[in-house]
Amino acid sequence: MKNLDRTIDYWFYLEIYTYVSINEKVILLYNTLDGSHIEVKNLLIIDLVKNIYNPINGGVILLSGNMLQNNVIYLFITKVLSFYMGDVIEVSLSFSKPTQILPLLNLLSNFKKSGNIDDNIIENKVMMYVSDISLIIDSKIFDANFFNLLLNFSMLIPSTIKFNLLLNDFINNNNIVELITFTEKIHFTNKNIFIRYSSVCSNVIMGYEMKYNVLIDFPLKRKFFKHALYILNDKKIDFKMIFLIASISDYKEAIELVKQFDIEKYEIKPIFNKSNIDFFKQNIYMSRSDIFNDVISIREIFAHQVLNTNDFGKLTIKTNGNVYANIHFHPLGNIKTHNIQEIIYTELNEGNSWLRIRSQAPCNNCIYQWLCPSPSDYEIAIGKPNLCHIHS
């Protein structure tokens, strides 16, 4: 770190990897390389940093010796330098004022809701952002032509996306063959099946060349759990168990099962059941320290400002043909009457999922607004835009 001479003039700038968030009362500087951060509640410092981002200054401001005589400014600049968030250049050693390339937010700027998205953009660019297709088998009996419609609907989607097959508690045996035939025909290479442990049985497992995700809810029926585990191990299926927990006791039981049965791949996923809000407040709601637990890249911060990183690129299809960007919202169309381009066009212009960001109160006036993860299904289920202890 440079030693500042408080009697000379410097050019001062912030590094391009330093993210800055400002509201009326506080300023946050965040180093997206290592997660270090500075918060200052001082109008003088707020104005100083705002000047850096004034277009006429080109990302660099004059830091005079007179300014450095002010202890508030001096201590702030010293801290910025110690955290490698910015740097200074002696004015006397430079031929002219340097310039700094400021990071610009242009990620998917063409896809903001504008009402006039060009069809060529939809077909040629947005198609590559489809990342997940999920098929929910939510009916015991479904139209035999459904799978042919789905095959045709998905042909324009890249084969590298993730395809998820979500099975309900009971699948009619007459449809099992159709399911197996469909999964073999569909051109996606990353295929996943999600199935409840109580539904795992030999005739469902056989024939699938998919990655298995077994859903475990509570209270646990141990007889079915052990039977499912036996079948998965006996057939040498590569599987992951997803424990759906609604309480601390569920969590403890899940961990005991992992240890007792030596389960290598598993995930703990909280679920909201309308009566466990205290569990969520104590264990899921974010605190200020939670926000800074992991290093957040500048790319992630920019992404949070324009799209929902939980939902963007994901489509869900039900066996009645309805297509959703998120099943908590209205369907975007139906594979019987709409093609994939029309579905995406509708979501980008009229939908509530892919571009759902933290743009409403209280998040829109919070300095951590874009450091927080995108809104999730938890916010929808609980009916609250922010699940945090900062703005309760």
Image (cartoon, grey):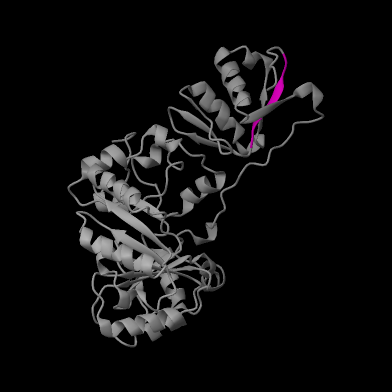
Q: Which of 179 and 255 is in front in this view?
A: 255
Let me know if residue 336 appears in the view: no
- Taking 50 as reference, is 388 left or right? left
Instruction: Decide whether residue 13 is among the magenta residues.
Output: yes
**Picture residue at 70% right of the left edge, 21% below the top:** 2
**Picture residue at 53% right of the left edge, 72% below the top:** 158
Name the main secondary structure of what is drawn in magenta.
strand
Q: Residue furthest bottom?
A: 145
Residue 205 x, y percent position in the rendering? 35, 74
Please tell me whether residue 309 is drawn above or below residue 4 in the rendered image: below
Q: Nearer the viewer, residue 45 or 75?
A: 75
Please tell me whether residue 69 is drawn above or below residue 145 in the rendered image: above
Let me know if residue 176 appears in the view: yes
- Taking 334 as reference, is 225 left or right? left
Q: Nearer the viewer, residue 236 or 185?
A: 236
**Where does the magenta region start and end?**
8-15
Q: In which quarter of the image is the C terminus?
A: top left
**Picture residue at 53% right of the left edge, 60% below the top:** 110
